Structures are given as structure tokens and as C-alpha cells.
Amino acid sequence: LIFSAYIVFTMQLGFALLSTGSVRAKNAINTLFTSIIDAASGAISYYLFGFALAFGTPSNGFIGGNQNFFGLSSFPEDYRYDYGFFVFQWTFAITVSGITNGSMAERTKFVGYLLYSPYLIGLVYPTISHWFWSNDGWASPTRSDKKLLLGPGTIDFSGSGVVHLVGGIAGFWGSYIVGPRIGRFNGSGQCLAIHGHNASLVVLGTFLLWFGWYGFNAGSFLTILKSYDQSRPYYGQWSAIGRTAVTTTLAGSSATLTTLFCKRLLVGHWNI
């Protein structure tokens, strides 16, 4: 689990390189600054109160609140959560802010981002992750009663909704509020292309994000030594983890080729 957390953490480097390579050179330092803030301020805010709001039990269906989890003051507890689980969940939390980082690049003041990032990581994301991933959340599949969707609840295995949809919605509203970059449209409203300054950083960032997703998806099993069928002792959680890695590989490869050829058909040339 904690090794998977290390892999997911490399996604922060992927976000930093991808976003920095995609902006103009004059905004590279500011973009790198925001990536560091995501990891550093996100760690402190998630440690102090984010983890407790997400997984603190007993709690209500909307938000957690076990006082023993604030600042990990009494941890681990009852063998439910250990330090490795905290680190793993922290890497998920800062990924949400990393997604929004690129959405508002080149037009967000550093001080504004310094205030926004810990708020998103320490309050907004933990509240939503509590809904789906804690035992008490109103939409959780592990809730003891009144589960949604005729019984099973909302199953989000590795964060497609809890992490990526939350980051995407935050990025949408952030980009809507700050508006387009200067020079994005001409006087008649025609869209103008603004090219990034370094394609090498974009490609390196993309590969690091791809690498990070193996920790994201396969690591979401949380444990590996679990047998499924005693009649087939060779088949267990380790097989499901391997299958998840295969799925992640095929998904990334299919998306790469689909985007490559669609772009070729739309614009008439190959585009990295």
C-alpha cells in the first residue's frame, strides 16, 4: 500500500512537468510554484483536519469528525487505519488539486492559489470522499443501512468520481471565474492558439502520470495477500491487481492511439 502511495506521489511531478511544458516560458516558474504548494500545503491541511473529515468515525453521512484523527492524535486505531493508509489517501487528495492546477494555469495569482489549494485538499475533497469511501457516508457501499441504488451504494473503486470528477469540476469553475488567458481570443472573438514552450516536458509529464496511475488503480485494492478461491490457490487479490495493471496499460495505450489519429484527421498533421 505504501509503495503504491510512493508511485501515486510521482504524479505530482507529472502534473508539474505537463503543466509547465504546456504554458509559455514566462509563466513556467509560477506553474512550478503551484505544484509544490499542492504537495506541501496539502500535506499539512490533510494531516491536521482533512483525514479526520474524510474517515473519522463515528460520524454522520455528510462529514466525518472523530477527534482522534485530527492531526493523527490517536493513530492507528482499532486496526482499521494505519499510517500507510493516511499517506495513500494524501496522495489522492493532492491529485485533486493537481488536476485544477492546469485548468487555471497562466492566469492565477500565486497568493490566490496559496489560499485555494489547502482549502480544496483539506475541506472540499475530504467531505466528498467521506460520502463515498467512509463507512458512514450517505452514498457509501459499506454503509450499514439505507444504501443508494437499490442496495449496493455508489461504488467508486479508485477515484474516477471522488478524485477526478471533483478535480475536473473545481477546474471548470476555476477557469470560468478567472476567465481566458490574455491573447486567447482576438477582437472579433476568434479563438487563437497559445502553444506551450516545451514539448519535452509535456511528454515526460505524461509518462509520469501514466506511471502514477498504476499506483492509483492497482494500489486501490489496499492489500495483496488475499485468496479468493481455496480450490484455486494460485488465484487471489494478486491476480486482480495484475489484471488492473493490464487494464490501465490498455486504457492508456488505446487513448494515445485514438487521440493521435483523431487529431491527425482533424488538423491534417501529427501532433505530439
Image (spheres, rainbow, N blue to C red):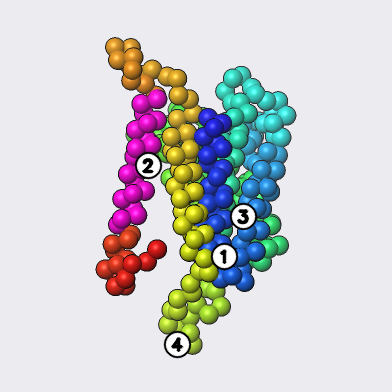
The extreme front residue here reads 200
Read off the residue under disc 2: 248
Give the spatial CA distance, label 4 vs label 2: 43 Å
Q: Earlier in the sequence, mark 3 or mark 1?
A: 3
Read off the residue under disc 3: 35
From the image, state whether disc 3 or disc 4 is nearer to you.
3
Question: Could you tell me the amino acid type at mark 4?
Answer: Ser
Question: Could you tell me the amino acid type at mark 2?
Answer: Thr
Question: For this rendering, which residue is in front, 56 or 113?
Answer: 113
Please report the residue visible at 39 percent of the width from the left and 24 percent of the height from the top: 237
Q: How far across and down, in percent of the image, does residue 10 sit?
A: 55, 45
Give the spatial CA distance, label 3 vs label 4: 35 Å
Q: Earlier in the sequence, mark 4 or mark 2?
A: 4
| Dot 3: element | helix
From the image, state whether disc 1 or disc 2 is nearer to you.
2
Report crowding for label 1: few under 14, some 14 to 19, many 20 or more residues within 10 A (C-alpha).
many
Visible in this render: residue 137?
Answer: no
Q: How far across and down, in percent of the image, does residue 139 sit?
A: 46, 37
Q: Earlier in the sequence, mark 1 or mark 2?
A: 1
Question: For this rendering, which residue is in front, 94 or 241?
Answer: 241
Q: Which mark identifies residue 105?
A: 1
Q: Which mark identifies residue 188?
A: 4
Q: How far across and down, in percent of the image, does residue 156 sit?
A: 42, 39
Q: Magenta span covers which residues?
A: 238-258
Q: How far across and down, in percent of the image, does residue 41 sit?
A: 68, 48
The extreme top residue here reads 231
